[in-house]
Image: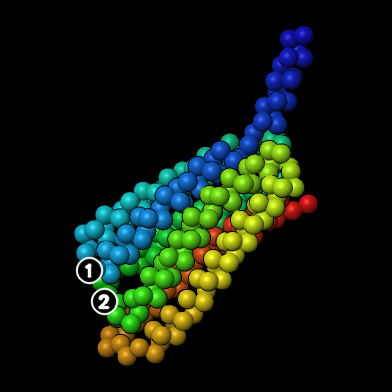
Amino acid sequence: MGGFGSMRSALLKLFRQSPFPLLLKHAEVVREVAPVFRSAVIAYLDGDMGDFEKYHNQTIMLESQGDSIKRNLRGHLPRGVLLPMDKFKLFAYIREQDKVLDSVQNVLHWLSYHNTKVPDPIVDDLLLLVDRSLYSLKAVHPMVSAAESYFDSFSEEMRQVVKESIAQIREYEFQSDQVERKLLADLFAYPFENPIEAFHLIRTVELLGDISNHAENAADMMRAMIAR
């Protein structure tokens, strides 16, 4: 009887491993960084480098939390654990979700290298691109939450909810891409006196675009995980 009980316990442990508590925890960090990131950009535009560095450092700490959760997730999925999805697709997913955080940090790192005065005609569209990036950041958590419910039930209804979340992130990336292209065209056309500042802002826009790109990549991997 004891042998059967031990075997049953081992089997249950094999099947009970779920990556979603940690995936959700990581997605919460992604969601939490959104307002901090926006505050950092606003402080930079206002020339308040003290506040900018405060929010920059908060972002660094959140990115570090995300890395820790990612390592924890990988460490808690040993060889032989049975998962409701392909493990390689899961690892590809968490890598892209973590790159969303990396991309946010990269923008602020890059801004910190040079105090560039953003031309007035550029400011509104730059903030629009930031906000489109925030939409992508905030959409990750609902997608992961819906996916957890789907893999608990395998109901077609929940699968459709996940697909709708994926479609929303793709739409945000499309919107972000449109703003990014306009900004780049405007920056190349602007008569900068200092070429360093021109390069700094062009690269800033490209890095901002990476946030939505990686959110979309994560959504694409989620689509692969729920595929039948």
Position of 38 relative to 197 (above/below): above
Task: Check disc 2 and report the residue beneath it.
Answer: 117
Element carrying mark 2: loop
Seen at 38% across and 70% down, the residue is 127
Position of 10 relative to 201 (above/below): above
Task: Check disc 1 and report the residue beneath it.
Answer: 47
What percent of the width, then of the height, locates residue 156?
Answer: 75, 47
Q: How many residues crowd mark 2 within 10 Å: few (<14), some (14–19), many (20+)? A: few
What percent of the width, then of the height, locates residue 55?
Answer: 30, 55
Seen at 37% across and 58% down, the residue is 37
**Residue found at the far front of this picture:** 157
Residue 19, quarter of the rendered image: top right
What percent of the width, then of the height, locates residue 64?
Answer: 41, 48
Q: From this viewpoint, is residue 7 visible?
A: yes
Position of 81 relative to 2 (above/below): below
Element carrying mark 1: loop
Quarter placement of the N terminus: top right
Marks 2/1: CA distance? Answer: 8 Å
Q: Amino acid at mark 1?
A: Gly
Q: From this viewpoint, is residue 217 visible?
A: no
The total of numbered circles placed on residues is 2
Q: Nearer the viewer, residue 147 or 55?
A: 147
Q: Amino acid at mark 2?
A: Lys
Seen at 45% across and 85% down, the residue is 185
Asked if the residues shown at circle 2 and circle 1 are in contact, with their CB atoms under 8 angstroms apart, the answer is yes
Q: Is residue 179 left or right of residue 49?
A: right
